[in-house]
Amino acid sequence: SSNESAAGIAHVYRGTFVHATYHTAVEILEDRLLGVDTEGKVCHRRKFSIHFNFVVIVVCSEFFMPGMVDTHIHASQYSYAGTALDLPLLQWLNMYTFPVEACYKDLEFARNVYTHVVKRTLRNGTTTACYFATIHTDASLLLGQIANDFGQRALVGKVCMDTNNFIPHYKETPEESEGETKRFIGELLKKKYPLVRPVVTPRFAPSCSAALLGHLGEIAQNNDLHIQSHISETKEEVKLVKELFPDYDSYTDVYHRHNLLTDKTVMAHGCHLTDGELKLFRETGASIAHCPNSNISLCSGMLDVRRVLNHKVKLGLGTDVAGGYSPSMLDAVRRTMDTSKALTIQDTQYNTLTFEEVFRLATLGGSQGGRLVWKGGGGGGEVEGLLSPSLNQYINDQIHDDL
Ligand code: GUN
Ligand code: FE
């Protein structure tokens, strides 16, 4: 309804609402009202009862639910989603991923794939996505523009990497990476897209020098920006990080000591984190993007989500296209259940996740993890946007007679 809302018509939606809160994993509210103001923002129930110029939309046999938040997806890898899943992570990156990502130097190639991925994820119910693009600044800016044009809330990351022994033409110097990240942030913010923000994106420790990690931590800190990367996805990768960064306590410590663990950080995977590392996540407020399809497809590991939640670390779900073959968050929900049940097969005492809990992770969990959904739509209003996953304070529990 965003086009009509832009034209200045307020709406009230009447029907069944299914959503998640901090107290209740799934709450079902039957025959309720939700108001959306003339700017397309959900309005507080105290307010919309005094609006008279609205259109009322009644939905009977269906229900409303919050948009889903994909906390980790590589927009640039959408072109080969569903193929090339026959190698473990580090070989997979060299053989398939880096050669494809190098193509995004070509803006028309980028425009084609980025248009498809934004349309497809929206159609699948992803109203907020945290995207990795590629090292190319202009193509990454284009992804931001496309997300804005289609009305998707997006965190867009220009990928940073100054190490690549396999495809030497797909990397930057540390100076280029730092300079281009600053240009990317500056130019994206200048566009003032209401729903799109830049996110500082070191690819992962094995692709970045300590100097580059330090620059990126500083940029994020100086501009209060979100940060995203990968961590402890496979055992081989953890071993490699130990070799590359021998003076650090752990993989997590590598990011922490470069100021890359904050309460606006989203780290993908985390399958092999120790208790000590999870404690550091908890202390810094950093969150984990659980990507079960990818973890299984690349045989990386099985994240024990229950253990992460017991550590009170924030967690959302991600598709991790193209390590994960599906761009759908409903698939991420199913794969999260599957992984939890596989862990239960291994240990019958395991506290299996419930479907309701996983629904919450796909919606509220994603917005909380890394604080991906922010207040307002650029206007600085007091209420969160229409896409906010926690709707409870906006849903009216009384049906007005005049509706
Ligand atoms: N680690 C570093 N880069 C990547 C990537 O593109 N995909 C996945 N799944 N893991 C990574
Ligand atoms: Fe990834």
Image: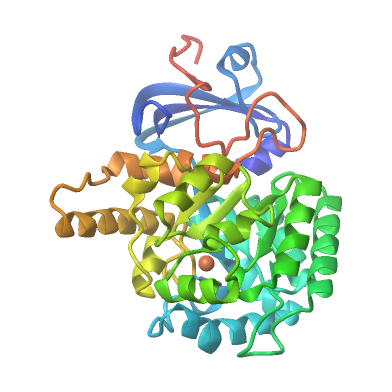
- Relative height, residue 192 to residue 111 (above, below): above
The colour style of the image is rainbow
Residue 142 screen position, x and y as percent: 75, 66
Residue 260 in percent (x, y) is at 66, 54
Q: Which corner quadrant of the image does residue 149 belong to?
A: bottom right
Q: Residue at x 59, y 19 (%)?
A: 44
The residue furthest left is 348
Residue 387 locus on image (x, y percent) = 57, 39
Q: Residue furthest front?
A: 247
Q: How many marks?
A: 0
Residue found at x 67% / y 36%? 5
Image quarter in which the N terminus is found = top right
- Where 56 falls versus 93 (above or below)? above
Q: Nearer the viewer, residue 21 or 92?
A: 92
* Residue 91, percent from left and from top: 48, 85
Quadrant in which residue 326 is drawn: bottom left
In this rendering, position of residue 362 left or right of residue 119 = left
Q: Is residue 368 above or below residue 332?
A: above
* Front in this rendered view, residue 251 or 385: 251
Inspect this view and state whether residue 341 appears.
yes
Identify which residue is drawn at 66% across, 33% down.
375
Q: Is there any visible trace of residue 316 in the rendered image?
A: no
